Image: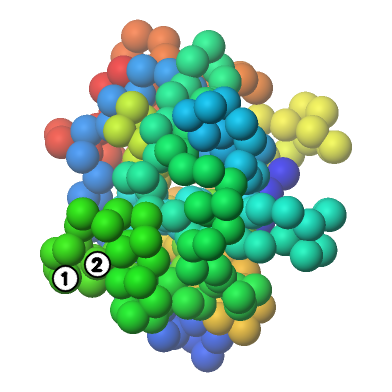
Amino acid sequence: MRRTMMNATVVGFLALAISPVMSAAQQSGTSDRRPGSDLDEIRKVGALLEADVLNTANEKIADMEDLILTPEGTILYAILGQGGIAGVGTKYFGVPWERFDVKHLNGKWAVNLAMSKDDLANAPALESGDYREMTNPDWVAKDRAYFLPRDKTPEAGNSRVVSSMLRASKINDAKLRNAQNEDVGEVEDLLLDRNYRVAYAIIGRGGVLGIGESFIPVPWSKLRLAYDRESKAITASIDATRQRLEQAPLVKGDYSTLLGPGFAAQVDRYFGVTGANSARP
């Protein structure tokens, strides 16, 4: 499975730990600002995090380690790892997402970054374990100047400062709780639409060791996320009762059910996502 999340009505449960970022995290659950998601394929974030990063000469230059998301589900940065063994001695970099050429073909990811291994090694490195440099406007400006030298617009750099460290690797495997503070499932994976924005979180319920588990697609805008600065964990919640989730539309293990005619729209209607916020495969 995959990592940790939460809701405004259980604010007392986490108030001391996550109050500095709760308001930003709530945006993804209350505003429903996600544009119509073009879900034409099943693009799993979990698989993307296992991809090799290649340059134009088809040489591997880094590993894809993580994605930094906005509360609305837009990818701001990819965290790349270079060198080291089992994470020891690895050097990490935050690369602006627009710098990549990313394709998803036949269920597989192709991630290309047009630079040499040495050029990447000379980029501003992330020295902290929690990537907190990305919350520093000066570091972000330096990083973007290195990777996007033509982008001299201060506003563009300022808009890419990370205010809430929503890491995809931490969201995957997160426990999901409801307004009654009940454990109602776990985030199995996130799905991206054709614009590479998060469209759905897949919630796993029941089963033992993955056997007999059911999978619920939940529109991204219906989750509330919060980041705990101390534990580095992400908590998630949804404004739905246990019974409501038990009756939600289900998808099979490869999630391809979402691509069936009208199914994504059915899911959106069930969770109250309509109009411009509705997924239309």
Q: Position of residue 261 (x, y in %)?
A: 35, 9
What residue sits right under mark 1 in the picture?
Answer: 154
Q: Amino acid at mark 1?
A: Pro
Which residue lies at the image location 51% right of the left edge and 52% below the top edge?
119
Q: Is residue 8 left or right of residue 232?
A: left
Marks 2 and 1, how far apart in space? 5 Å
Q: Amino acid at mark 2?
A: Gly
Label tally: 2
Q: Is residue 256 left or right of residue 198?
A: right
The image shows residue 20, relative to residue 167, as above or below, that is below
Please indicate, yes or no, whether residue 141 appears anywhere in the rendered image.
yes
Q: What is the quadrant of residue 27 in the picture?
A: bottom left
Which residue lies at the image location 78% right of the left edge and 57% below the top edge?
84
Crowd around label 1: few <14 · some 14–19 · many ≥20 (10 Å): few
Check if mark 2's residue and mark 1's residue have beta carbons within 8 Å: yes
Q: Position of residue 9 (x, y in %)?
A: 43, 72
Residue 157's tag is 2
The image shows residue 218, relative to residue 6, as above or below, that is above
Q: Quadrant of the N terminus?
A: top right
Q: Nearer the viewer, residue 106 or 100?
A: 100
Which residue lies at the image location 49% right of the left edge and 15% below the top edge?
105
Residue 27's tag is none
Q: Nearer the viewer, residue 45 or 91?
A: 91
Q: Residue furthest bottom?
A: 16
Q: Is residue 181 left or right of residue 134?
A: right
At mark 2, the secondary structure is helix
The image shows residue 103, relative to residue 72, as above or below, that is above
